[in-house]
Amino acid sequence: MTQSAKLIYGDKEYQLPIIEGTEGEKALDISKLRQESGLITLDPGFANTGSCTSAITFMDGEKGILRYRGIPVEQLAEHSTFKETSYLLVNGRLPTQKELTRFSILLNDHSLVHEDMRAFFENYPRSSHPMGILSSMANALRSFYPELDDLEEEINMTVTRLLSKIRTMAAMSYKISRGHRVVYPRPDLAYCANFLNMMFHSPVRPYEIDPDAVKALNVFWILHADHEQNCSTTAVRVVGSARVNLYAAISAGIAALWGPLHGGANQAVIEMLTHIVENKNMNRIIERAKDKNDPFRLMGFGHRVYKTFDPRMKIMKKMCDTLLGKLKISDPLLDVAKELEEIALNDNYFIEHNLYPNVDFYTGIVLRAIGIPTNMFTVMFAIGRLPGWIAQWRESIDDPNWKLCRPRQIYTGPQETRYVPIEER
Ligand code: ACO
């Protein structure tokens, strides 16, 4: 029997159907609310608003659960690769060996970037943030790879191009920003190893591919591959709802991810930890985070959905110890991060506000150990999130209820008022 909720407003009653997901999550369906009652809902930050139904990612913020297409992220981090997980997200199931091989061939075939695009990279001011460059370059891809007539082919081609080329473009922009020669992708290297080689190989110092670094990068990207309707994914869906091409929608996602409250937090965490190491001021940082009159927040702490430990954080924390141990690196930031976490988790302010470390708290330390520069951290996140954005966009265009996103508002400005000519003001 379909459940419903009753809304009483004025002298009328309205039945609102209850929608239930496969994990028992319930929602009030208000799609006819305004039409029938004249009311809209008001939910700043959309914390109580479901914007779609989705079969891609399930997360339970209270229990710390995260699954892609039903598979726990812990299992994927342990057994899968980023390439396989990308296939899973975009296509809805794990690939067979034949499908995975074909996917690898396609990614390899599309890994080069049009040579004319190099001019863009070379002409950006050297101090530009790589996220700004990546967002513009993702959008620029449309001009270099015009739309194909066959819709299905166009979608498949665009998805493959994006997954492969964004990785090449990220490494290119790093090389060019340093004034180094661009390293081309190699057909004999798998997805993550290829990226590391493009980043760190140099004609005078060949890059030795370290399997521990490759494993760490696979895990990092798997953990970032999707996170249901977060800010950047919502941006991709909202922008995509205007029927813009996928490159432009992804470009919007990259722009949203850049913000320090979202993907930009991984860079902000390392800056904060470095500040603490240099100034030995951990207590002061904690006091500032708790001070209502200070806008400063403990970066890498808190989450809109997780009100317990972020399952991705636990894996990244373990990865810090494993990787740094294997690479024989001693990073003072790891000691400071662990101490800060310990203090915060025992502090009443953080306990009462349900503030736990999120994925970004430890990822920067792993990325540093691999050799990734701090200003590239959010780009690393963006490469990881790409399959999730693509899967979400694809799901939205396949949805028969795919509508232009156009929220309403409650207007609070002046009522109708007369235009006053300048001489009378
Ligand atoms: N440090 C100190 N106080 C915090 C923090 C923090 N990191 N996060 C939240 N709070 C406090 C707020 O000040 C607020 O306090 P109040 O109720 O006494 O006024 C309360 O907790 C709720 O804060 P909101 O911003 O309403 O909570 P929300 O769930 O919307 O915030 C967010 C989530 C934006 C991630 C927040 O926790 C934050 O800013 N964290 C730091 C940035 C960060 O790490 N972002 C990465 C998120 S993960 C990701 O995007 C990959």
Image (cartoon, rainbow, N blue to C red):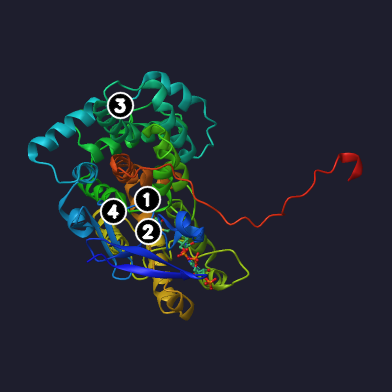
On screen, 172 above or below 219? Answer: above
Read off the residue under disc 4: 223
Residue designated by label 2:
331
Quickly name the residue at label 1: 368
Where residue 35 appears, as percent x and y from the top left, is: 46, 54
Work out which residue is located at the far top of the displayed protein and give it.
Answer: 116
Amino acid carrying label 4: it is Leu
- In the image, which disc is placed on residue 184? 3
List x then y, in percent, for residue 194: 25, 35
Dots 2, 1 in contact, CB < 8 A = yes
Q: Secondary structure at mark 3?
A: loop
Of all residues, the one furthest to the left in this rendering is 97
Q: Callout 3, which amino acid?
A: Tyr
The picture places residue 125, in percent across and down from the top left corner, at: 55, 31
Q: How packed is label 1: few (under 14 Cα within 10 Å), some, or many (20 or more)?
A: some
Mark 1 and mark 4: Cα distance apart in space: 17 Å
Question: Viewer-proximal residue, 415 or 235?
Answer: 415
